[in-house]
Image (tube, grey):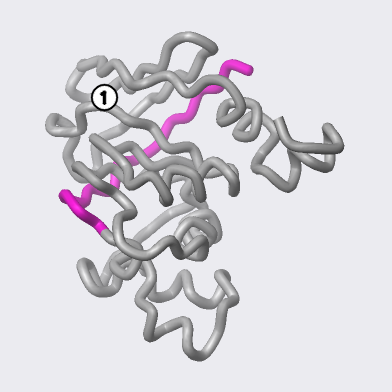
Amino acid sequence: MNQTLEARARRFGDNVNTDYIISSSRKRDTLDESVLVSWLFEAVDPAFAASVKPGDVIVAGRNFGCGSAMEIAVTVLLAAGIRAVVAASFSRTFFRNAVNNGLLPIECDTSKIDEGDRLRMEIADTALTVRNVGKRRTLRGVPIGGPARAILDAGGLVQYVRKHGGLP
């Protein structure tokens, strides 16, 4: 399925680990992502949680989501209304958790994207582009295909299994 997303970029650097996304200390009291969203990225940007808007997209450098394989890092992003992360590269576990939960992981060169840039992401079967609207730049992303694409198109792994009765 072809998909287009338009969003405001929220910029982070390299090696953003899952504990930066949501601190382990916050999960001692609750695992409710609608509560945890108040502390999203508090270790790297204490004002982020109050400023994030539904439809924003995270833009980061290399190795986004490294560290522990906490699925809740993805679900808290989704609870904040973030539908995609654009990064130069992802940790393998974060990428898989993103796909399984319906968070779109877009891999491309992010070095020319700044905080607040307006992005238009076009996802097609064989191509993926990220257009930086204000800077009039088009970046080529790594297309997502096969079972990962089918799971994302269904909205996540649970929705895929409900719809198809099994795994791809």
Give the residue drawn at x 51%, y 90%. Answer: 29
Mark 1 surroundings: few (<14), some (14-19) or many (≥20) residues within 10 A: many
Q: Looking at the figure, which quarter contains the C terminus?
A: top right
Report the residue marked by disc 1: 132
Q: Secondary structure at mark 1?
A: strand
- Seen as rendered, the residue at the extreme top is 126
Pick whichever, 129 or 27, lies toward us. Answer: 27
Q: Position of residue 13 (x, y in %)?
A: 16, 50
Q: Residue at x 46, y 64 (%)?
A: 70
The location of residue 63, given as percent across then percent down, is 24, 46
Disc 1 marks a residue whose amino acid type is Asn
Q: Is residue 136 above or below residue 101?
A: above
Q: Is residue 14 magenta?
A: yes
Residue at x-position 38% and y-position 32%: 106
Residue 97 spot, x, y in % from top left: 51, 50
Q: Quadrant of the N terminus?
A: top right
Q: Quadrant of residue 51?
A: bottom left
Name of the residue lying farthest toward the left: 111
Q: Where does the magenta region start and end?
A: 1-16
Number of marks in the rendered image = 1
The answer to whether 155 appears left or right of 111 in the picture is right
Q: Position of residue 95 (x, y in %)?
A: 43, 43
Q: Residue at x 51, y 52 (%)?
A: 81
Residue 113 higher or lower than 27, as above or below: above
Farthest residue, direction bottom? 29
